[in-house]
């Protein structure tokens, strides 16, 4: 029987095998500087940090360790957002495994994990940005001292303001899809897990279909940051067209990769959904 950490690692691996995932690295497509193999190595490298997530210590430190391990390959940032999404899910799932509490891996259970985060978890989250380049927006006016690109140098400001990791996520929830999950009970993650469980066929194919449904439902915030709002809206509109049979998924995937339109937040949500589905009985 697979452990919580096994399923978290497997979720990261299965996410990148889903094909097609328009704009993302998958089995058929690489980016110029980021390849399929880098995601495989990132998944394996993150495992030591995922293991720390179930040991009951600071969640932020475990997340930072997972990012540090993930970055130990030549491609750079492969799964920062997915690991941030997984962190509270993994901890909540471990409550199920250790205590026999079936409510741990649930929106309420994961929200309890989020609410329990501390200022030092926030400090570790900021330090994680020192290990890898992450696309971020400028902080809100008047909060320059909380720019995540400052890394550990932002620690005094975090401590002075008394901001927990949950507070930091709340500050970004309106512009970042992963942060929105943190403060919103992981609604989209659990919904997509249900899709995966209700679907049939090979799991990578299910992952591809879940990715397309997530992208069709909501604009990808990573595309907004790295391309434009217009590009993000186009990607969502065309994902709907693929689901409706009006476009071919492989062709759209090739085009978005060529144009550098990368729905990375949607991939993060897919990884989180795969983890929840695996813990709820998705067979591989």
Image: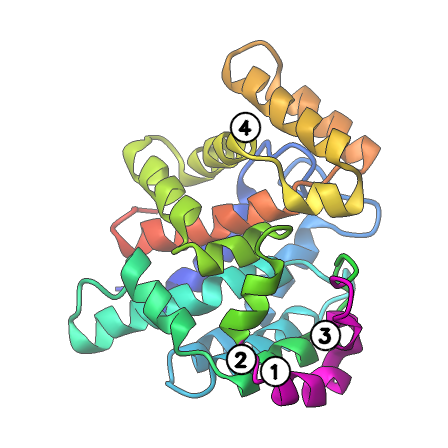
- Labelled disc at residue 246: none
Q: Is residue 217 visible?
A: yes
Residue drawn at the location 62% of the way across and 89% of the way down: 159
| Magenta segment includes 138 | no
Name the N-terminal-most of marks 2 and 4.
2
- Work out how far the residue at label 1 is from the one at label 2, CA to CA, in angstroms: 5 Å
Q: Residue at x 55, y 58 (%)?
A: 179
- Residue 217 left/right relative to 40: left
Label 1, label 3: how far apart the Cα atoms are: 13 Å
Q: Is residue 93 left or right of residue 11?
A: left
The crowd level at tag 1 (other Cα within 10 Å; few <14, some 14-19, many 20+) is many
State if disc 2 and disc 1 touch (CB < 8 Å): yes
Q: Nearer the viewer, residue 50 or 88?
A: 88
Q: Which is more N-terminal, label 3 or label 4?
A: 3
Tell me where residue 31 appears, x and y as whole percent: 78, 44
What main secondary structure does the magenta stretch of the protein show? helix
Secondary structure of the residue carrying numbered label 3: helix
Q: Residue furthest front?
A: 142
The part of the image, by quadrant, that contains residue 107 is: bottom left
> Disc 3 marks which residue?
146
As helix, strand or loop, the secondary structure at mark 4 comes to helix
Residue shown at 38%/85% (left/top)?
55
Q: Which residues are magenta?
A: 139-164
Local packing at callout 4 (Cα closer than 10 Å; few below 14, some 14-19, many 20+) is many
Query: In this figure, which residue is indicated by the disc labeled 2?
Result: 60
Q: Closer to the camera: disc 1 or disc 3?
A: 3
Up-down: is 15 above or below 217?
below
């Amino acid at each position: 029987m697979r452990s919580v950490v096994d399923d978290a690692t497997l979720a990261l691996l299965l996410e990148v095998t889903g094909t097609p995932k328009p704009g993302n690295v998958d089995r058929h497509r690489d980016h110029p500087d980021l390849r399929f193999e880098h995601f495989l190595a990132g998944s394996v490298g993150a495992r030591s940090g995922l293991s720390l997530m179930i040991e009951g210590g600071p969640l932020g430190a475990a997340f930072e360790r997972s990012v540090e391990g993930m970055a130990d390959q030549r491609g750079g940032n492969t799964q920062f957002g997915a690991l941030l999404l997984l962190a509270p899910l993994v901890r909540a799932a471990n409550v199920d495994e250790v205590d026999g509490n079936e409510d741990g891996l649930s929106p309420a259970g994961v929200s309890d994990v989020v609410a329990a985060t501390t200022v030092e978890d926030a400090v570790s989250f900021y330090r994680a940005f020192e290990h890898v380049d992450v696309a971020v927006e400028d902080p809100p006016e008047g909060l320059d001292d909380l720019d995540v690109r400052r890394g550990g140098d932002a620690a005094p400001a975090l401590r002075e303001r008394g901001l927990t990791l949950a507070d930091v996520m709340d500050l970004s929830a309106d512009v970042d899809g992963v942060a929105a999950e943190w403060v919103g009970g992981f609604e989209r993650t659990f919904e997509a897990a249900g899709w995966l469980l209700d679907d049939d066929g090979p799991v990578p194919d299910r992952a591809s279909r879940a990715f397309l449904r997530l992208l069709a439902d909501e604009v990808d915030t990573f595309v907004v940051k790295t391309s434009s709002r217009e590009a993000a809206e186009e990607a969502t509109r065309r994902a709907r067209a693929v689901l409706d049979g009006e476009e071919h998924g492989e062709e759209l995937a090739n085009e978005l990769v060529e144009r550098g339109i990368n729905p990375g937040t949607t991939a993060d949500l897919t990884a989180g959904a795969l983890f929840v589905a695996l813990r709820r009985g998705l067979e591989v």
